[in-house]
Image (cartoon, rainbow, N blue to C red):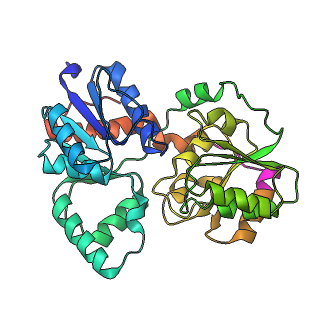
Amino acid sequence: MLNQYKLAFILPPLDDTGGVIPAMMAVIEYLKPKEYQVDIYAIGKTKLSSEEKIFIINTDNKKLQYKYFIDCFTNDYDLVVANNLRTHRICIENDVKNLLCHFHQGNLLRDQHFISFLLKRYKMQYVYKNRYISFVSQCLMQNVMKKFDINTKHRDVIYNALDKESLNKKANDTIEENLPQEYIIGVGRFTKLKRFDRLIHIFSKLSSNEHLVLLGDGEEKSNLEKLVDKLGLQDRVHFLGWKKNPYPYMKNAKLFVSTSSSESFSMVLAESFSLKVPSVSYDIKCGPNEIMVGELKDYLVEDNNEDKLLEKIQLALKYYPDIKDEYLEKFSVHKIANKFLNVLEYYVNKKDLIKN
């Protein structure tokens, strides 16, 4: 019986605005009807409370996180998936069995002071030696393995999952605001790495009449609002805040644009294509170039080339190739869930466990 297999996903807070939560929840929701027992442990400050099969560890205090995790965790799972460096460490130091350390963190590839880098590399080599690890993109895996010289034979790429049916259902929800008839959209955290300032600068040079809708929040919001004022774009740029369901706004946009300087996967870019929304992106180190394939590559622009990005935005507003389902098949929730089940199979050594 399949229901003898127990899985645990160790996650950031479930109300976190990053791409980890929707990707992992898509996998979890896919597995539940298939009679696997799936528990969630969410670690970090949150407004949510525990419920059946969901254990909330509501604190950012590292010592308390360790304590509360030990108090509620039962180390009898056939597979445990930890989804960030903090949860990796908590699981490893508590000798969690059947552990998969899943990497989403593109910031591991950022330049560091040499001494800091050496200390980080030493720690990474020690912590992840001979462990089963996975990454949300091929680029992230290649660069992290090379940069930190991690010694393990057990590694894989497990992309963020797209549940196309669920996305399209959510995208049909009603939009409360009165939006412009034609608009370009940007979605994400307002942080320096996401570089919404670049998007606003480029938009200010656009000769057409589209508006710009920005969904998100963060520490850079005030600076972005000041930039909009400085460029005289108050009537054409709309800050709508963070949305629990951004998909109706995305679906109705003429174009999605990503000007981020750092991604490990770029979940929102994959989601935009899943909703058949034309998209333009900078070709940064990781993420977009594994999503924008086939004819979509023509709208992937050399990083920091604002003139070229503007040119591609103007072209995309007039013409965009078909967004073929085959481009996104490798991110389907069915394929990604089976990637995790392959790791489960490795631990339980049941060769007949997974059926396509």
Q: Is residue 332 above or below residue 125?
A: above
Task: Tell me what residue is drawn at x 42 percent, y 44 percent.
Answer: 20
Q: Count up the numbered dots.
A: 0
In screen coordinates, is 345 left or right of 231?
left
Q: Position of residue 334 (x, y in %)?
A: 41, 33
In screen coordinates, is 57 left or right of 175?
left
Task: Tell me what residue is drawn at x 27 percent, y 41 percent.
Answer: 81
Q: Position of residue 284 (x, y in %)?
A: 54, 65
Residue stretch rendered in magenta on the structure: 315-324
Task: Tell me what residue is drawn at x 36 percent, y 35 percent.
Answer: 337
Please identify the residue farthest to the bottom as the structure is shown: 114
Q: Nearer the viewer, residue 129 or 40?
A: 40
Residue 54 in magenta? no
Res. 350 visible in picture: no
The N terminus - image quarter: top left
Q: Position of residue 79 (x, y in %)?
A: 21, 37
In screen coordinates, is 39 left or right of 25?
left
Res. 248 visible in picture: yes
Snapshot quadrant of residue 153 = bottom left
Q: Is residue 295 above or below residue 149?
A: above
Judged by its main secondary structure, the magenta piece is: loop
In screen coordinates, is 149 left or right of 143?
left
Q: Nearer the viewer, residue 327 or 263?
A: 263
Q: Position of residue 96 (x, y in %)?
A: 14, 43
Snapshot quadrant of residue 177 = top right
Snapshot quadrant of residue 9 = top left
The C terminus - image quarter: top left
